[in-house]
Amino acid sequence: MGTNMRFSLLEDDWGRILDEGLARHRMHAQRSAQLKGRKKPYQIDRYWNLDIDCVLLGIASIWDALRKKQIIYAFAGVDVFDPDVVRSGQLKGSGVVGGARKFIMPLSLPPNEAAQAAALDHWNRHKANTKHSKTRAAEPAVGHIVLAVAERNSEEENNTSVSITIFDSSTDTVPQGKIAFKAATLAVRSDWLGDRRSEFSTKSLPQWPKDKLPGVHRQPGFQQPMGSNSCGLFTILNAWAVMLEIPLSNNVRRRGRRTDRELLIIGQELVNLALAGCMDSRTIQAYLNVFGLSERQDAANREDDIKVQVDAVRMDNAKFLNELNVQEYRDAGIPGPSLSPEVEEAREDGNPLPEAHVRSVMIAGGAGTTREQALRALRGANGDVEDAAAIIQAEKQDRKPPSTVPENESPK
């Protein structure tokens, strides 16, 4: 899990919060991994060249945590965001859920080959004389991923104008007009707005010099280390900041005192811990402040606190598809294939576990499973019924009595 590297992050309050948060979550992840029958969490094995599937799961770990607090952002799965299923402005199997005022849209695009070649050349020429020297060797990008956030300008039924903000950590990789067009097309042609169609706002916004689209603007912000191909990682981090309402810095160069190498490696670990269900919004906020990716905030000032504190939800492909399905049912106002939000809240350690989950584990655990065993396994599995049942079955397997057949005698 994560990296064995340990960096001293004690120079300031945010550094202390980050250091303590990482230590706490690493310990939680290690304990979770030692549980018998516990499935290994989904993890990313690098911070570069992440594909859209990895990015969606990373974002979903916080999106789902907020959803369980009834803070809803429109979101979708690979059927909407995978470029292989988006052709000529037509979407196959669109499944945007949430219907919220804001739509979180990670966009995957092919790279600008000339810009990517220049970035890789810069990386290779400079890494031997910098902190990058122990980081991976550069390699060509497989594409470029950016974050777009579409927002309805009004909730009024007759006003469906939309504004879109682009968060791009490498603005030279793909022409900005191409990103704007794809974002606008996705916002309008997906089922986010239901049966309605959007007219883009013409209000005054910072515009690109070319290929202007009314209502679409780029948020100035930090540019990833040249040649690092870490756009997927920064798309996840930017999405977390937007959803948690942590103001991102407008500076192209980050103010953080840490090295780029620390920025990338700890960023990868943050995502992996979140995917394992071992991360919280305060630690994320500390990371963004320590590395200067957010606006300067005061750790001791309550006004700079995140409005809603959440713990990341353990996430993998099966879990993500299930949660999208649950939200789709809720959007339609019909009972879904899951329990109520109040019951889902009770999955967190220390909260009373729902009776329906306890009964399910007792049944899945097999004959002789007691209520106490089910409760203990549910707590160990962080409320996941399938994992809890697997823990009980593994324990029963360990407790099987040894064979009574003598060593030199075969059973009949």
Image (cartoon, grey):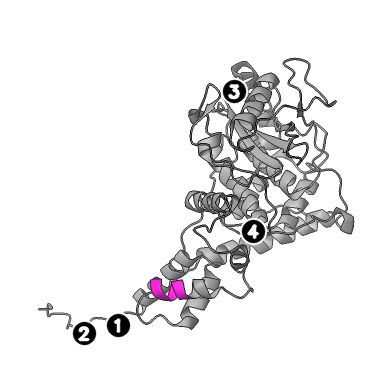
Mark 3 crowdedness (10 Å alpha carbons): few <14, some 14-19, many ≥20 = some
Amino acid at dot 1:
Pro
Q: Which element type, helix, strand or loop, lies under badge 1? A: loop
Q: Which residue is mark 1?
A: 401
Q: Position of residue 313 (x, y in %)?
A: 60, 57
Please say if the residues under marks 1 and 2 sit with CB atoms less than 8 Å apart: yes
Alpha carbons under labels 3 and 1: distance apart: 60 Å
Q: Is 95 within the magenta?
A: no
SS for callout 3: loop
Main SS, magenta residues: helix
Q: Which amino acid type is marked by label 4?
A: Lys
Q: In this orientation, does residue 172 appear?
A: yes
Q: Tag 2: residue type?
A: Thr
Residue 122 seen in this snapshot: no
Task: Residue under label 3, please give it.
Answer: 111
Q: Residue at x 70, y 37 (%)?
A: 131
**Quadrant location of the N terminus?**
bottom right
In the picture of the structure, the residue carrying the numbered disc 4 is 68
Q: Which residues are magenta?
A: 359-364
* Residue pointed to by mark 2: 404
